[in-house]
Image (tube, rainbow, N blue to C red):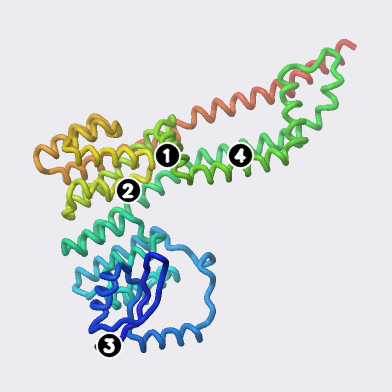
Amino acid sequence: MSRFAFKARGPHGVIEGVQDGETPGDVAQALTLKGLVPLAIQPEKAQQETAAKTASAPVSLPEWLQPKVQPTDLMMFSRQIYALFKAGVPILRALSGLQDTAQNPKMKAVLLDLRRSLESGLELSTAMLHHPGVFDAFYVSMIKVGEASGKLEEVFFRLFKHIEFEMFMRQQVKSALRYPSFVILAMAIAVGVINVMVIPAFAGIFKNLKGGVPLPTKILMTTSEFTIQYGWWLGIGAVVVFFLWRHWIKTPDGHLIWDGFLLKAPIVGPIVSKAALSRFTRAFAMSLKSGVPLEKALQGVATAADNAYMTKRIEGMKDRVLRGETLTAAAVWSGIFTPMAMQMLAIGEETGMLDEMLEEIGELYSNEVQYELKTLSQKIEPILVMFMGGLVLVLALGVFLPMWSLGDATFKK
């Protein structure tokens, strides 16, 4: 019988203590029977040595100053551990090797904690729950499925493909929005320079016109005066409104309303909707292929859409399936699928090839999103051109109409 030092989470917080047992797994089982969630278990002597090393170790940077674990790090982790599993490398040795080669200090620390948790008798999915900022609920749920079905190697490969697809979609969106963003920024800077530097230089001359100031010139002069007098307040107000908006969309109600608005917004709405559905159907297919029951799969992948409104509709689908409705009928009620996707879903359910049809639907939506993103600039360009044309027209009329009046007055003299 050995003595093990443990750290566990109980009803009133984290507790530490010592427990007798033959192995760390026996200690973990004993703690679980007591209603505790094991966090770390190690021999008492090793725990004392670890404490001594920690006391003598150099002070590291605070956690908020350390680089975060990026999606690229998680994607490479999934790909590498899949390759190591396929080569027959044990999980502890695989984690040790990945820890040595990790470039991100934060990821290195996470891998070290995973390895220590496994050595103390915890399952990999339980160890990942200690790092919600790195492994989201969907990732952990898929690892649980892999552990239960014995297909952990396959699950890691599917997670790698899933993260790769997510990153590709984000890069496509950034690429499509780059040109319009630069144009809007240039227009904003141009308007600011004209209001602050150009219009005030002519304002004194224009006010002395005998025939009165033309309407376009009045608009420019009023806008310029307002910008000069209240420009700082406008900037401060814009910053305050931005942070209030950021805080609001993080609340449950605000997040739900904003995500629902994005789905119905012109131009970007179809892209957001199809991208969310592509993520959901791919994740749903991956869960079903891994052996997850239909109801649990719907529950587990509801958040994969990355849209609060769609997540709520998917959870409603799960409730209807639990009441005995078919998945196709629940999907019709949700109102989030296109008619083509509904037909494919019905065929998949009738033929027992639901997972394959869901993959096809995900691929269909993915291709449509890629096409929409490629044509996004073409849809935005006419709007930008019209706005720039209107701005140039107002500026031209506001500046040249008074000049023509001055020229006429000089010619008559």
Would you place residue 369 above or below residue 47 in this image?
above
State the separation of the CA atoms marked 3 and 4. 70 Å
Residue 138 in the image, given as x and y percentages of width and height: 31, 54
Earlier in the chain: of badge 1 and badge 4, it is 4
State the separation of the CA atoms marked 3 and 1. 52 Å
- The quadrant the N terminus occupies is bottom left
Earlier in the chain: of badge 2 and badge 4, it is 4
Question: Marks 3 and 4: CB-CB under 8 Å?
Answer: no
Seen at 81% across and 32% down, the residue is 201
Query: What type is the residue that disc 2 sits on?
Result: Ala
Question: Marks 3 and 1: CB-CB under 8 Å?
Answer: no
Residue 58 in the image, given as x and y percentages of width and height: 53, 82
Q: Which residue is mark 4?
A: 186
Earlier in the chain: of badge 3 and badge 1, it is 3
Seen at 44% across and 68% down, the residue is 106
Q: Nearer the viewer, mark 1 or mark 2?
A: 1
Residue 80 in the image, given as x and y percentages of width and height: 29, 67
Earlier in the chain: of badge 1 and badge 2, it is 1
Question: Marks 1 and 2: CB-CB under 8 Å?
Answer: no
* Disc 2 residue crowd, few under 14, some 14–19, many 20+, Cα 10 Å: many
* Disc 3 residue crowd, few under 14, some 14–19, many 20+, Cα 10 Å: few
Earlier in the chain: of badge 2 and badge 3, it is 3
Q: Which residue is mark 2?
A: 304
Residue 312 in sight: yes
Task: Name which quarter of the figure residue 9 lies in.
Answer: bottom left
Q: Which residue is mark 3?
A: 2
Q: Which residue is mark 1?
A: 256
Q: Nearer the viewer, mark 1 or mark 4?
A: 1
Residue farthest to the left?
Answer: 351
Drawn side of residue 223 relative to residue 371, left or right: right
* Disc 4 residue crowd, few under 14, some 14–19, many 20+, Cα 10 Å: few
